[in-house]
């Protein structure tokens, strides 16, 4: 099997093995933590959740980070990335423990959201560092394969973490706080795994400035502008187009996720436990789609080119999403989860490869931070649109059709750019 052979080749690189271990533990913890949040916000029996409430929660958790994300990217290019992974994981473990305490206490909801916001912000910082560090642990000839397997393995780890959270929540302890503490333990393990790498291994190469944090932040606007100019250069137009296409596909994914949450909560199940179990099954099927993307993307992107593979992914989603989504039944929706997992992850692998191949090492941190900010903004925007279009039970034909049109527009725009 090609994917097994490719993984064996990559695992010969000691730095890749160690960076992959940090990614798997970190994103596994993310999966546990995110399922705990979803269970607490959406599936608590005492809460009558609406699409607007879900959108509000996403806005509270993600939008503030969108304001500070570029600052994090500049710092990521100034600080040792190994240290970012170490201290970021330790901080998330501490903050996750605070979230568990708040779930158990009669504290106001806004304190819970603040703690979750902090975990999410540090999480995006760590993910940017993992992506920016990848070219440091593999050679250029294997970067496409590494971009296919490493982030996809992380996504599968997040899915497995989500599965572990469902098991803990439904079978071991009927407590969202217990699930959060499991995530905190995995964050601590990620911090310990990062210590297996040398401080200098993950870069950046250039001498690191020794000024204080306040002094470093004063140059953020200038450095960020330089990063945007770097991305906007003619030789990097493909990277800019790929980022725009991936942002729109993220918008589609966010809107459909809100619809899935509401369908699992109200339309397709009769109890909150059944709804949580169906959501877990859907996420597991989507994880299988992520794995399928890791298997087929190196072959297809190698023959078509990453840009054309994005066209294929968006086009397939445009055709299959309405066919599988409009029945609003469990079986077709599970099939749609697989298709969207495959197409979304396939497009992301291609986008990561285009960006990493086009962007110089000294700019990767801030570019990937902007990448994450785009993900957040479009995801929250999708949740807001879904909140306006979705009825209480989550069934909305106009939303399904609108998303299909957006997928088709992305495919058409990328195809036109490729011809030019």
Image (cartoon, rainbow, N blue to C red):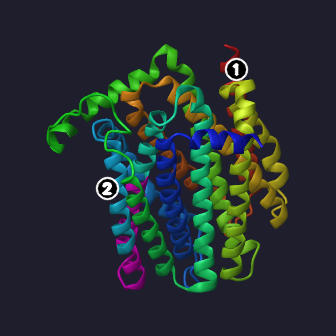
Residues packed near mark 2 inside 10 Å, few (<14), some (14 to 19) or many (20 plus) = some
Residues at marks 2 and 1, CA–CA distance in whole angstroms: 44 Å
Helix, strand or loop at label 1? It is helix
**Left or right: 6, with 355 as reference point:** right
Residue 188 at what x, y percent from top left? Answer: 39, 65
Looking at the figure, which quarter contains the N terminus?
top right
Residue 126 at what x, y percent from top left? Answer: 41, 50
Give the residue drawn at x 73%, y 51%.
Answer: 289
Give the residue drawn at x 38%, y 47%.
Answer: 197
Magenta-drawn segment: 99-123
**Left or right: 216, with 24 as reference point:** left
Q: Which label sits on residue 416?
A: 1
Residue 173 position by quadrant: bottom right
Looking at the figure, which quarter contains the C terminus?
top right
**Left or right: 339, with 310 as reference point:** right
Residue 418 at what x, y percent from top left? Answer: 68, 19
Q: Which label sits on residue 161?
A: none
Asked if the magenta segment contains residue 114, the reply would be yes
Give the residue drawn at x 69%, y 75%.
Answer: 277
Instruction: Look at the magenta stretch and give its main secondary structure.
Output: helix
Residue 410 position by quadrant: top right
Q: Is residue 271 visible?
A: yes
Which is more toward the observer, 88 or 392? 88
Helix, strand or loop at label 2? It is helix
Q: Earlier in the sequence, mark 2 or mark 1?
A: 2
Q: Which residue is mark 2?
A: 87
Are discs 2 and 1 less than 8 Å apart at CB?
no
Q: Give the label, 2 or 1, closer to the camera.
A: 2
Using the image, determine if residue 208 lies above or below residue 113: above
Using the image, determine if residue 395 lies above or below residue 241: below
**Left or right: 250, with 362 as reference point:** right
């Amino acid at each position: 099997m090609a994917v097994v052979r490719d993984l064996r080749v990559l695992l010969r690189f000691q730095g890749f093995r160690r960076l992959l271990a940090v990614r798997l533990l970190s994103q596994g913890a993310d999966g546990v933590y995110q399922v705990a949040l979803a269970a607490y916000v959406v599936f608590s029996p005492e809460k009558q959740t609406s699409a607007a409430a879900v959108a509000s929660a996403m806005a509270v958790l993600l939008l503030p980070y969108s304001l500070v994300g570029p600052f994090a990217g500049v710092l990521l290019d100034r600080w040792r990335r190994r240290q970012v992974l170490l201290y970021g994981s330790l901080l998330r473990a501490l903050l996750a423990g605070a979230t568990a305490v708040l779930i158990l206490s009669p504290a106001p909801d806004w304190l819970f959201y603040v703690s979750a916001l902090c975990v999410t912000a540090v999480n995006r910082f760590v993910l940017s560092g993992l992506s920016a560090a990848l070219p440091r642990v593999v050679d250029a000839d294997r970067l496409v394969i590494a971009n296919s397997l490493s982030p996809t393995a992380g996504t599968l780890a997040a899915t497995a973490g989500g599965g572990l959270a469902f098991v803990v929540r439904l079978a071991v302890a009927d407590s969202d706080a217990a699930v959060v503490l499991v995530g905190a333990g995995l964050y601590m393990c990620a911090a310990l795994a990062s210590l297996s790498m040398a401080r200098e291994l993950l870069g950046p190469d250039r001498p690191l400035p020794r000024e204080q944090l306040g002094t470093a932040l004063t140059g953020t606007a200038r450095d960020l502008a330089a990063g945007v100019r770097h991305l906007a250069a003619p030789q990097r137009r493909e990277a800019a187009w790929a980022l725009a296409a991936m942002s729109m596909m993220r918008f589609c994914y966010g809107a459909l996720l809100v619809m899935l949450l509401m369908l699992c909560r109200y339309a397709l199940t009769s109890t909150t436990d059944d709804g949580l179990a169906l959501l877990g099954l859907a996420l597991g099927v989507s994880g299988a789609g992520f794995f399928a993307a890791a298997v087929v993307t190196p072959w297809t992107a190698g023959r078509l080119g990453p840009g054309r593979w994005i066209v294929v992914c968006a086009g397939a989603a445009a055709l299959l999403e309405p066919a599988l989504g409009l029945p609003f039944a469990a079986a077709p929706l599970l099939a749609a989860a697989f298709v969207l997992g495959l197409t979304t992850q396939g497009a992301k692998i291609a986008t990561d490869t285009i960006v990493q191949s086009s962007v110089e090492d000294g700019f990767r941190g801030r570019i990937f931070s902007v990448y994450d900010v785009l993900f957040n903004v479009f995801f929250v925007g999708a949740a807001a649109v879904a909140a306006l279009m979705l009825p209480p039970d989550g069934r909305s034909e106009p939303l399904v059709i609108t998303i299909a049109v957006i997928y088709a527009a992305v495919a058409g725009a990328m195809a036109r750019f490729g011809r030019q």
